[in-house]
């Protein structure tokens, strides 16, 4: 599990592409301080497993499903990437619950400065936007952010200068694809409100029941 608080920006040093997969080699510093084989590191919000490392970099396998669903396939040698190690049991919970399982990509359609803040508007598919709520949490390229506005085709976030400086979001341009992970709690709530049809598995908890009782 991650929190969406980026620890450092790394650099993609190499990518070995297979027929339907790839191996990424990423230069880093902070996330390597206590790295071990098999550790999880979020790369632009995608949970990857460390399969090799040295004093300056680590490598991770990327499977077909991950390349299809995320923007990792657009990375090139030299690309900066957001990095975060899995949250330690005694760590601070600075962001929100982030699984590192990207739901899909969005496209930056507008960037606007607002005094010291910067607004980003991101277009996304209806299957993602259904879980995006105003003042709720969203993960963009592994960054835990608060949704400021939302409509039927997009949502907007506003970031402070510090976030722009320490993450790759400050380097993004209009038209860029970004990885999106919606709040996992909303997905579980939706699933529980749509129980299986069999009587033995049905909880009786439905949307109509909750509305009737004031929820």
Image: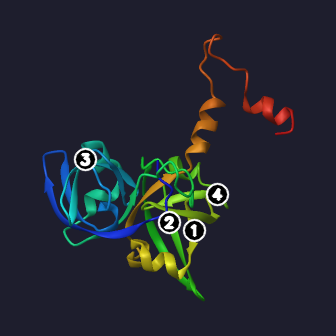
> Residue 117, which numbered label?
none
| Callout 3 touching callout 1 (CB < 8 Å) | no
Measure the C-alpha gap from mark 2 to mark 3: 35 Å
Mark 4: secondary structure: loop
Picture layout, residue 212 above or below residue 96: above
Write down the residue under mark 2: 122
Secondary structure state at the residue bearing disc 3: loop
Count of numbered marks: 4
Frontmost of labels 3 and 1 is 3
Residue 105, position as x, y percentages in the image? 41, 56
Image coordinates for residue 131, horizontal then vertical, percent: 59, 49
Q: Are marks 3 and 4 in contact (CB under 8 Å)?
A: no
Q: Residue furthest top?
A: 200
The quadrant of the rendering that contains the C terminus is top right
10 Å crowding of disc 1: few (<14), some (14-19), many (20+): many
Q: In front here: 111 or 23?
A: 23
Q: CA distance from mark 1 to mark 4?
A: 11 Å
Pointer 3 or 1: first along the chain: 3
């Amino acid at each position: 599990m991650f929190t969406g608080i980026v620890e450092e920006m790394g650099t993609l040093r190499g990518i070995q592409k297979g027929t339907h997969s790839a191996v990424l080699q990423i230069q880093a510093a902070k996330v390597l301080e206590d790295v071990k084989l098999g550790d999880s590191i979020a790369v632009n919000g995608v949970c990857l497993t460390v399969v090799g490392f040295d004093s300056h970099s680590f490598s991770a396998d990327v499977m077909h499903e991950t390349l299809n669903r995320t923007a990792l396939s657009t990375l090139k040698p030299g690309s900066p990437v957001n990095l975060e190690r899995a949250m330690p049991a005694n760590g601070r919970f600075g962001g929100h619950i982030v699984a590192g399982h990207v739901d899909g990509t969005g496209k930056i359609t507008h960037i606007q400065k607002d005094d010291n803040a910067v607004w980003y508007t991101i277009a996304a598919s209806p299957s993602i936007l259904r879980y995006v709520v105003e003042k709720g949490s969203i993960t963009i390229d592994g960054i835990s952010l608060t949704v400021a506005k939302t409509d039927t085709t997009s949502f907007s976030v506003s970031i402070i200068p510090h976030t722009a400086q320490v993450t790759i979001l400050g380097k993004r341009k209009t038209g860029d694809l970004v990885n999106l992970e919606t709040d996992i709690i909303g997905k579980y709530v939706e699933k529980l409100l749509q129980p299986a049809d069999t009587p033995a598995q049905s909880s009786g908890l439905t949307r109509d029941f909750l509305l009737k009782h004031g929820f």
